[in-house]
Image (cartoon, rainbow, N blue to C red):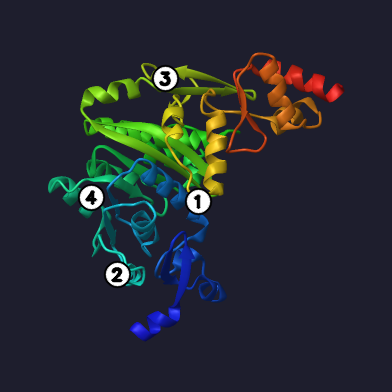
Amino acid sequence: MSSRLTLALRLYREGKVSFYSTDLEELAKMGLPYTKAPIFYNPRMKLNRDVTISIFSSLSLKSAADLMAASGVRALRLKAEGGAEEVFACDSNCLSAQIIKMNVKLNKLSGIRVKCSDARLEAERMAWENERVDYLDLDPFGSPAPFLDSFLRAVKRGGIIGITATDEPPLFGIYPDKLLRYYGVWGKKLPFCKEFGIRSLISFTIRTAARLDLAAEPLLSYGEGHYVRAYFRIERGAERSKHLLKELGWVLYKEGDFEIIRGVDEMPRGAMGPIWVGKIVEPEFLGKLSPLNEEVGKLFEKLKEEADGPPFYQRLDIICSKLNMRIPKPKIVIESLREMGHFAARSHLDPLGIKTTAKREEIEDLIRKLTSS
């Protein structure tokens, strides 16, 4: 078996670690997508892992677990670059577990425990045996919803959980029935669907944690490529979750404009939610982070610029299409809105999306002025 494995593997380099995983080029020649790899590895998720390392190392965390470790690249990097003292790498694919052990030896790393087991089973065991960790990663293929209960229990008090969701069609409201079933949120596709997806994920996480008498405080969330990502600090006690639940609310969307309604006491007719209507990035938390590299630094700068903005964004292309006018440069629109006394920043989720406190009518008037001059 080992000879066939060797032929199917390729040596990769990411960050400061080298590791073996499925040869994706050979897989492509067979007409198979990367999702069919016997040992899963997605190089397009490098930024996702880079941000994880930035957060882990900046906070000087000690213990970490990746219970869907696949090739083990995130676990390896948490040890080699993040400074983790103890790392638990687990995967339900026993072939993956063998490869992770090989990759640990390849990088001459110690303090990494590897196991073949079910992710939810291990998370429950960690909680039951009090082996909770400072950082736990939840990065499944698709929705994190089926795993969240177990994973939240496995995080230490004051620890961090990083959650990835790649099921964009439900989260973005393209499949409203699945959004409701998976996340307990009612919604449909909106012009700012990416941010709606992030806020739905945050809302679901907070509500799930509250049901377990835990508080999941949103620290940093973003969307990139085909996924959304959110980091939370986990605290124990039902009382701690109350102020977070008060930051849930609804969005009313009509004729290109939207209204945010805070509180979930009543669901207004036609509203979508319940979603998180607080900040998706905590500036104080972001200020503590040292970016691992230039790409992470650019992302952090974008998040910093929009951190204090209101929920959701206006899309210049949609507004200009309605007005039958050319699209002005976003930078000029932002500068003009700031001169008018409004908060204004570009959304990292959409190159033509602008977060602003200005009303839709004010933005339309500004565009008319800018395009006529």
What numbered label is drawn on residue 123? Answer: 4
Q: CA distance from mark 3 to mark 4?
A: 35 Å
- Which amino acid type corresponds to the residue marked 3 in the rendered image? Met
19, 165: nearer the viewer? 19
Q: Earlier in the sequence, mark 2 or mark 4?
A: 2
Q: Earlier in the sequence, mark 2 or mark 1?
A: 1
Q: Earlier in the sequence, mark 3 or mark 4?
A: 4
Which residue corresponds to the image point at 22% horizontal and 34% vertical from the top-left? 212
Which residue corresponds to the image point at 58% horizontal and 38% vertical from the top-left? 349
As helix, strand or loop, the secondary structure at mark 2 comes to helix
Report the side of 90 relative to 366 (left or right): left
What numbered label is drawn on residue 195? Answer: none
Identify the residue position indicated by label 1 in the image.
47
Which residue corresponds to the image point at 52% horizontal and 38% vertical from the top-left? 300
41, 168: nearer the viewer? 41
The 10 Å Cα crowd at callout 4, few under 14, some 14 to 19, many 20 or more, is many
Identify the residue position indicated by label 2 in the image.
101
